[in-house]
Amino acid sequence: MDGVEPVLYPLLRKDLIAQGPRYVVQIGDKVIDYNEEFHLFLATRNPNPLIPPDAASVVTEVNFTTTRAGLRGQVNMYMYGKGLFCCL
């Protein structure tokens, strides 16, 4: 990832549209069902990714400069804290 594609902004901002008992989000020209448990993780090898100001307000940048095992442990602890524990 070297930046955030503008087509993802409605998803990042959670611009949800209520359609009866469900919520949808428009991605490009498609309307997609939205799941409250959805999480989006973007990763890059770039140590200084370009995140435009309009995306920076809705994106949390985390510097995971670590070993693969350390990163795996951090992600597992995050998911465990959210009650979504899985083994990577």
Image (spheres, rainbow, N blue to C red):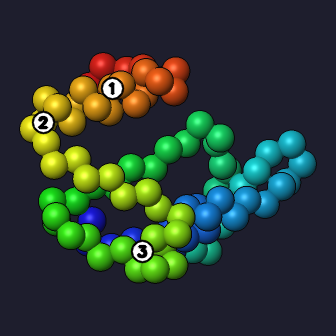
- Within the image, what quadrant is residue 86 found in? top left
Picture coordinates of residue 57, whole percent (x, y): 52, 69
Is residue 1 toward the left or the right of residue 51 in the image?
Answer: left
- Disc 2 residue crowd, few under 14, some 14–19, many 20+, Cα 10 Å: few
Badge number at residue 76: 1
**Mark 3 sits on what residue?**
5
Q: How many marks?
A: 3
**Mark 2 sits on what residue?**
68
- SS label for mark 1: helix
Q: Is residue 40 among what the camera can see?
A: yes
CB within 8 Å, label 1 to label 2: no
Amino acid at the residue labelled 2? Arg
Is residue 36 toward the left or the right of residue 4 in the image?
Answer: right
Badge number at residue 56: none
CB within 8 Å, label 1 to label 3: no
Amino acid at the residue labelled 3? Glu
Picture coordinates of residue 44, whole percent (x, y): 22, 59
Please state which of residues 25 and 73 is positioned toward the viewer in this rendering. 73
Sequence-first tag of 3 and 2: 3
Sequence-first tag of 1 and 2: 2
Q: Is residue 31 among what the camera can see?
A: no
CB within 8 Å, label 3 to label 2: no
- Disc 1 residue crowd, few under 14, some 14–19, many 20+, Cα 10 Å: some
30 lies above or below 68: below
Sequence-first tag of 1 and 3: 3
Picture coordinates of residue 74, whole percent (x, y): 28, 31
